[in-house]
Image (cartoon, rainbow, N blue to C red):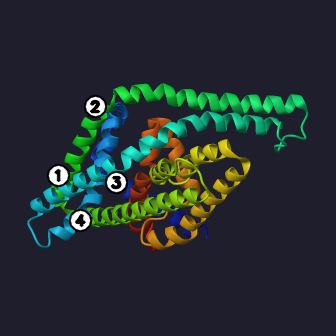
Amino acid sequence: MQVRGAWNGHALATSEDVNTSRTLGRWPLLAHPLAVGAAFVGLLLLLKIALDVHDVLLLGFFALLLSIVLSFPVGLLARVMPRWMAVVLTLILLLAGASTLAALAVPRVASQLGPLAEQLPEGLSRAREWLSGEHGGPVSKLTAGQGQDLSQRAEAVAGQLVSGLLARAVPAAFGATEALVVGILVLVLAAFLAYEPETYKRGLRALVPLHAEPVFDETWRRLGHALRHWVGGTMVSMTIMGTFAGLGLTLIGVEGSLVLALITFVGTFVPYLGAVASAVPGLIVALAKSPAQFLAACGVYLAVHIFEGYVVSPFVMRKAVRIRPALLLFGQACLGGFFGVMGIVVATPLLVCIQAVVQYLWVERRLGKPASA
């Protein structure tokens, strides 16, 4: 037994030595501490540069997502015409459609913004009174000091939110030209990506060793599959959520329903956090009119989210990469802490890419587990 144990220990040590020698043979620089230290410093410098230019990287990622959106009509039109012509025609149709929609919707939206801006402070004031127990609210049974303290805290938080929005509104208004230029650059970059996606794939593939090219091709395919399905499903969910929210708010008599529907449409792009945040303006406007309309607005948003979560999302996103809610919220919090609002917006598609890569390269290839694991 001792000999067998010693032999097993010797075999294990020999196996470890063989694995170590193989690793050092594949990466000879790992044998030199100075080279390892230099590589670590270089990695930190790359991370620092990425953090410094994170706005550019996030805009490039936005352009990638937009190119995926453009690839759907471009792919259909490219069957009957050259691809460059399909890209140009898609851009013309997109700009024409956006201009027509803006011409039809902007006057109505502008007419609703005035009353909506007047009702938001009124709704916040009514919420303060309701929280303080002046009209039989949920804290009416508390002592006067407790109710007053709670109402003052709620008013302070609401005041900070409103003042923050107003403080950012003025710089945003002055930066409209810059935003327009950036939007045009993102659209042009997305058009080039949609025109020749294989060119950029070949460029990245040239940097990969010959023996790893099949792995790169499969990784590229899975990333494209996951992003295409996620983008398509998200656009459908945004349209359904915005439409149903607008119809429901119109039926219960909430003013500014078109603006609120657009807010819901945009907010649905960010799962959970965006959906909840997009419901807050509609609830405040409904509360400004009456508590009954507030409860009706709660019912509308709740029904829309239940329908989206149990009917639309399972049907539309069934072929896409599914991310667990806890992981998604954690990713949104981390990216939001690093990059602000832009990080929260791109958190979901970025996590889709990370999960697809980890599933293939680590779970399937490294651990040898099946795709369904």
Q: Are marks 3 and 1 in contact (CB under 8 Å)?
A: no
Residue at the image point whose x is 33% and y is 57% from the top: 22
As measured in the structure, the alpha-carbon distance from the residue carrying label 2 to the one carrying label 3 is 54 Å
Nearest-to-viewer mark from 1 and 2: 2
Q: Which residue is mark 1?
A: 192
What kind of residue is marked 2? Thr
Of the two numbered discs 4 and 1 in the rendering, the one whose residue sits closer to the viewer: 4
Q: Where the N terminus falls, by quadrant?
A: bottom right
Percent x, y of residue 32: 32, 38
Task: Tell us which disc is closer to us: 2 or 4.
Answer: 2
* Residue 359 x/y as whole percent: 43, 64
The amino acid type found where label 1 is placed reads Phe
- Taking the image as shown, residue 345 lies to the left or right of residue 26, namely right
155 or 347: nearer the viewer: 155
Q: Is residue 86 left or right of residue 227?
A: left
Q: Amino acid at mark 4?
A: Pro
Callouts 2 and 4 close, C-beta under 8 Å: no
> In this orientation, which residue lies closer to the viewer: 218 or 78?
78
Q: Which residue is mark 4?
A: 73
* Residue 346 at x, y percent in the picture: 41, 48
Q: Which mark lies nearer to you, 3 or 4? A: 4
Q: Between disc 1 and disc 2, whose residue precedes?
A: 2
Q: Earlier in the sequence, mark 4 or mark 1?
A: 4
**Separation of marks 4 and 1 at Cα, in angstroms:** 15 Å
In the rendering, which numbered label is found on residue 177?
Answer: 2
Determine which residue is flagged by label 3. Answer: 23
